[in-house]
Amino acid sequence: MARPILRTKLCDMLGIEYPILSAGMGPSLVGEKTGATVELVVAVSEAGGLGVLGAAGYTVDEMRDAILEIKKLTDKPYGVDLLLPSQTVSAGDQEFKGPQEISLTEVLKTLPKAHYDWIMKIKEEMGLPDSEGSFKLGSTAMRPHAAVRVCIEEKIPLFCAGLGNPGFMVPDAHAAGVKVLGISGNTRNAGKIAKSGADLVVAQGHEGGGHTGRIGSVALWPQAIDAAFPTPVLAAGGIGDGRGIAAALAVGCIGVWVGTRFLASVEGGALDVQKDAILKATDEDTRRSYLYTGKTSRATYNHFHDLWENSGLEPLGFPTQVLFASAMVGMFTKADEREYIGPFAGQVSGLIKEIKPAARILEDMVEETVDILSRKLPESVIAKA
Ligand SMILES: Cc1cc2nc3c(=O)[nH]c(=O)nc-3n(C[C@H](O)[C@H](O)[C@H](O)COP(=O)(O)O)c2cc1C
């Protein structure tokens, strides 16, 4: 059977067959592998979409190795996603002499006393073991400029900034033929990212997994399109099948950026216990809170949310809060306290009933979108100008 056709301007911009990007997903917490693995990137790009590596939790060297691995496995376009919050970009790269990793137990001692004391109290009350994880001092989050330099040296097809405005690196990226994408959760930032020279803006609604803003997708997408004009916009937040894609294209987005649905794939980097949590979740079973990173992020609901809400603690800044949360999750994991563990995931979790290979997910999405746009809509909607 002939392959279905689903093309937008995005396909020409990026040299891809279908306007579907798998989102750059880093680890939910320190010590986990990334959500968007090399395997996921290659599977999505080979299937005709564009896979984006989640490089937020890697060291700069690990990120370069992953890029080289992708180049070995596919000649199709791909992307790399980093977190570039303005405070870490303006602080400049931090160079560390000596060991490049310290244990979470050591890191804990650097937390404010109230947070440290609270962790010790919960540890004692629940009889939790010490956390086993470690924190990489040379991660891309601590060395954003070095990480960006490697992406440009490697001439990756698409650079994606998950947090912050990538404007500062646009001239160097363009000089090397690298396209730049920025992600925004509100209209103002969509406009700012577009004005700073990025090629593409992702507008991610409140319902999305990971870091997320206050505006729902359907309200955000058209407003972001107007604010970013003439820079094109991709839709994100709550897209899990062809119905979501058809809706986003009807609003005027030129493609989609899909996270949770691709995390819950064979190649997605989440642990099996986390993928199970997504399969079990209904639309009501995620929470948005400051708990995991100090910025609002959405994860599958678990009892750690309740502990945090009752703690009376103020969230620490990013990335210190990541260390705080990682230390606790490290202890819960070691104690096999599954009810206290949940991955970053969006409200679309309720739609996900099966862990499938990423290529199947993409093919099913394309088939359903084409069916809606070419058959179902013309049959069910009467519209004449
Ligand atoms: C497990 C997970 C990790 C994520 N990590 C990142 C990240 O490191 N960088 C980033 O730009 N976005 C990250 N996100 C957000 C996604 O890129 C994307 O915007 C979001 O998942 C879209 O909403 P959806 O989950 O409803 O598809 C993450 C999302 C998830 C589910």
Image (tube, helix red, strand yellow):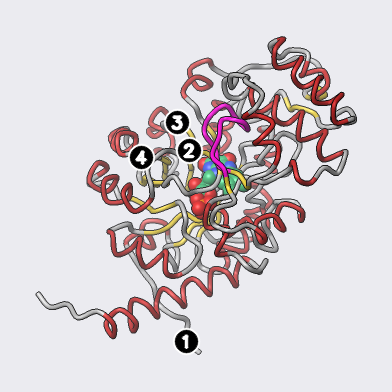
**Is residue 296 magenta-colored?**
yes
- Asked if disc 3 and disc 2 are in contact, CB closer than 8 Å, the reply is yes
Task: Give the magenta part as a residue range.
Answer: 287-298
Res. 199 image quadrant: top left
In the image, the residue with mark 2 has its CB under 8 Å from the nearest atom of ligand 1 = yes
Quadrant where the C terminus sits is bottom left
Please give the residue where the numbered disc 1 appears in the rendered image: 2
> How far, Cα to Cα, is label 4 from label 1?
35 Å
Vertical placement of residue 6 versus 374, above or below: above
For the residue carrying disc 2, how many other residues have a C-alpha within 10 Å: few (<14), some (14-19), or many (20+)? Answer: many
Which of the marked residues, 3 or 1, is nearer the chain's N terminus? 1
Label located before the other in sequence (4 or 3): 3
Which amino acid lies under the numbered mark 1 shown in the image of this protein? Ala
Mark nearer the viewer, 4 or 3: 3
- Residue, disc 2: 161
Image height check: is 329 above or below 71?
A: above
Q: Which residue is mark 3?
A: 164
In the image: residue 301, left or right of residue 118 = left
Q: Which of the two residues, 10 or 172, is positioned nearer the viewer here?
A: 10
